[in-house]
Amino acid sequence: MGRRVWVPVVSGPLAAFSAGFESWLRCRAYSSSAAVDRLYQFDQLSRWLEREGLGVGDLTGVQAERFAAARRAAGLVTWASPQSVMVPLEYLRSVGVAPAVVPRNAQGPLEGLLGDYRRYLLVERGLCDHTVFDAYEPAARLFLAAWECPDGLGLERLCAADVSSFLAGECPKRSGSGARDLVCALRSLLRYLHLAGVIEVPLVWAVPSVADLRDRTLPRGLEPAVVAALLATCDRRSLVGRRDFAILLLLSRLGLRAGEVAAIRLDDLDWRAVLLLVRGKGSRQDMLPIPVDVGEAIVSYLRRRPRCECRALFLRVTAPRQGLNRCTVAWSCAQRATGPGCRGWVLTGCGIRPPPRCCGRARHCPRLARYCAIASSGRPRFTPRSITTCYGCSRARGPHRQVWHDLAACGTG
């Protein structure tokens, strides 16, 4: 006798779309239990719309946030975040019953200038969305916000002293890498302001360089034994093992970046010519030959690759079924680097990261022993401020900090 699974019955304005929503979840590799949970959320959202006197056409992002806020106010903890409502909202928008996202119109001189700068980076410079929206635009907004006034921005009065004072106030608040990113983004903004005619004098020369000892030597390559040990950590009897094995071969044999591996699509593989189309930085595209072992690894993964509408080569193994991003590719490699024989070396597209060394005091802090991160560069000015000291053991508290852990070393301190 099979196991009985309870399936909620959706009532209210969204009842007519419940069957399609369930099929949509199945196509995106949601498990039976996860699909049931999402159907329950769909029913709760439909009942809330009925109580508020709203229809399907009124379900916008603002109403979705109101639904999540109502659940939080009632003391509920499930489906209480605005991000959790994005799944049913995405389905309703895909079938055309919920209003699509309307881009906000640029209001004011600051938003207008940022919009033009954003288009310049995306179209003319060919930067990716991650670099533009997460790095360059926030830095530009931070710099230009101080110049906003009722009469306009007044950037015609911008001089080198203003640039220096801005960096002198912002760089001490950031880590070494954060200061480098800010300086790089500010140079790009000043270069654009001069090209667009907003400022008459080029001020790129006024941006100082951040003291850095990187790139003093050539990147070190991995030893063949370490590469073999890294590849041996992949269990090719499983789907994840075959996928990670192919990713590691692409990184080690072709020297691709994590973002370039994540951007590979099924149409980029030319099996007749044995060539691979690589989409690099700045919208650059190169054709590289596919080595025999790399091709065999990709074919082995494709035989187990789930069938879906996504054309990305490497897919997630959990729902929703979609392609990997560059962070997931890097994280899968970092996990493999903790295997036996790898000594914690982390493979990158242009070299290796050395393994962290334990401070030797993790035994005094049992709760932090597993998360002991080592700041052993000897240059405190390059240590992120989010790393705090607890019994002499450095621990990263920021979720976006790239701190590499060596669990074996921390356990033997």
Image (tube, rainbow, N blue to C red):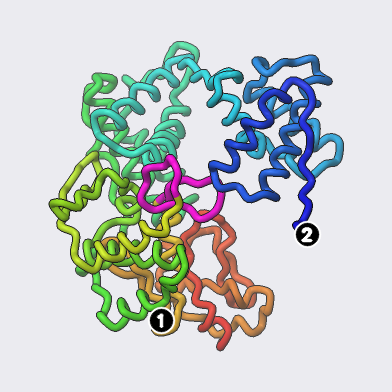
**321 and 334: which one is in front?**
321
SS category of the residue bearing label 2: loop
- Asked where in the image residue 38 lies, by quadrant, the reply is top right
**Residue 314 magenta-highlighted:** yes
Residue drawn at 62 percent across, 29 percent down: 89
Name the residue rendered at 42%, 42% in the picture. 310
Which quadrant would residue 162 be assigned to in this image?
top left
Q: Which residue is mark 1?
A: 343
How packed is label 1: few (under 14 Cα within 10 Å), some, or many (20 or more)? some
Give the vertical position of 293 relative to 100 (above or below): below
Residue 380 rendering spot, x and y as whole percentages: 45, 67
Residue 245 visible in the picture: yes
- Residue 351 lies, with reference to residue 161, above or below; the image says below
Q: Nearer the viewer, residue 295 or 52?
A: 295
The label shown at residue 1 is 2
First along the sequence among labels 2 and 1: 2
Whether residue 223 sits left or right of residue 95 in the image: it is left
Q: Which residues are magenta?
A: 307-325
Q: Nearer the viewer, residue 393 or 340?
A: 340
Q: Relative to 280, does residue 40 appear above or below in the rendering?
A: above
Crowd around label 2: few <14 · some 14–19 · many ≥20 (10 Å): few
Identity, as a three-letter code, of the amino acid under mark 2: Met
Q: Give whichever of 204, 274 is nearer the camera.
A: 274
